[in-house]
Amino acid sequence: DTGVSQNPRHKITKRGQNVTFRCDPISEHNRLYWYRQTLGQGPEFLTYFQNEAQLEKSRLLSDRFSAERPKGSFSTLEIQRTEQGDSAMYLCASSPRDIVAYEQYFGPGTRLTVT
Amino acid sequence: AQKVTQAQTEISVVEKEDVTLDCVYETRDTTYYLFWYKQPPSGELVFLIRRNSFDEQNEISGRYSWNFQKSTSSFNFTITASQVVDSAVYFCALSEAQYGDKLIFGTGTRLQVFP
């Protein structure tokens, strides 16, 4: 069974450009999460899905951020009009159960650098 | 308010020493879950343990052990006979039942094990 995969692994973009990241969860995991991690900090929750439904969004997720999971499998996170403050590692995780707080399995992350 | 505090920013030990990583949490919920994750230099978060608020039994897994004390709101992690491969950043995290599945992470403790 393969783990959570994320693409691209690295992205460098100029301020003002749009970027999109993809996450493929572990097969049959119905919960998918996005977190953001900046240098020297722990990951911060952004949003999560159960199947295709987006159940919660953090205040960190401004209107420039949008996430989708159209068929309940892979997910995309788009950032519009990127700002330098968006530079971070974007982590995706998945969880196999419907019960609360099952352990989350993380992917390798996408490192975004906004110049 | 939900909060996880890892007061130790960085710890350095010599191989074979025992080391304890501290974690203190704050929650108003009576049902909550505590986690430890390891983030090696490669960057991918690795799940280590999940504990619910109703289970205060300490747990041992090989060289790893965890001490959960509700009276002091602590969930400490001990590595016995540390090895160079244990070098990583370790994160403690909290999930509260009433707030769904999101993980609230501490700022992490960087452990360096020298040969």
Image (spheres, grey):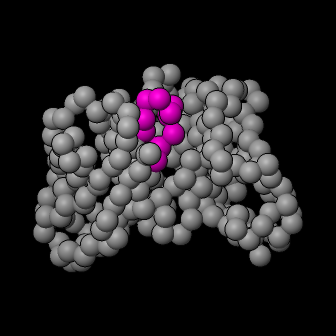
Q: Is residue A15 left or right of residue A90?
A: right
Furthest residue toward top: A98
- Measured as percent of width and height from the top left, residue B81 is found at 13, 62
Q: Quadrant of residue A74?
A: top right
Q: Is residue B79 left or right of residue B37?
A: left
Camera-nearest residue between A7 and B76 = B76
What's the residue at 75%, 37% (across, down)? A68
Residue B113, position in %: x, y?
A: 25, 72
Left or right of B112 in this view: A21 = right
Can residue B28 be spotted in the picture?
A: yes
Residue A76 pos. (x, y %)? 73, 43
- Residue at 33% from the left image edge and 30% from the top image edge: B30
Q: Is residue B36 visible?
A: no
Q: In the rendering, at what x and y percent does residue A106 appear?
A: 51, 46
A10 sits left or right of B30 in the view: right
Tell me, yes or no, whether the highlighted magenta stretch contains residue B102.
Answer: yes
Q: Quadrant of the C terminus of chain A?
A: bottom right
Q: Name the foreground residue: B3 vs B81.
A: B3
B51 or A31, nearer to the observer = B51
Q: Which residues are magenta?
A: B95-104
What is the number of callouts on the image? 0
Q: Does the segment drawn in magenta span residue A78?
A: no
Q: Is residue A84 shown above or below B94?
A: below
* Res. A94 image quadrant: top right
Seen at 80% across and 52% down, the residue is A64
Query: Which residue: 38% across, 52% down?
Result: B4
Vertical arrangement, residue A92 with respect to residue A55, above or below: below
Q: Is residue A104 above or below residue B62?
A: above
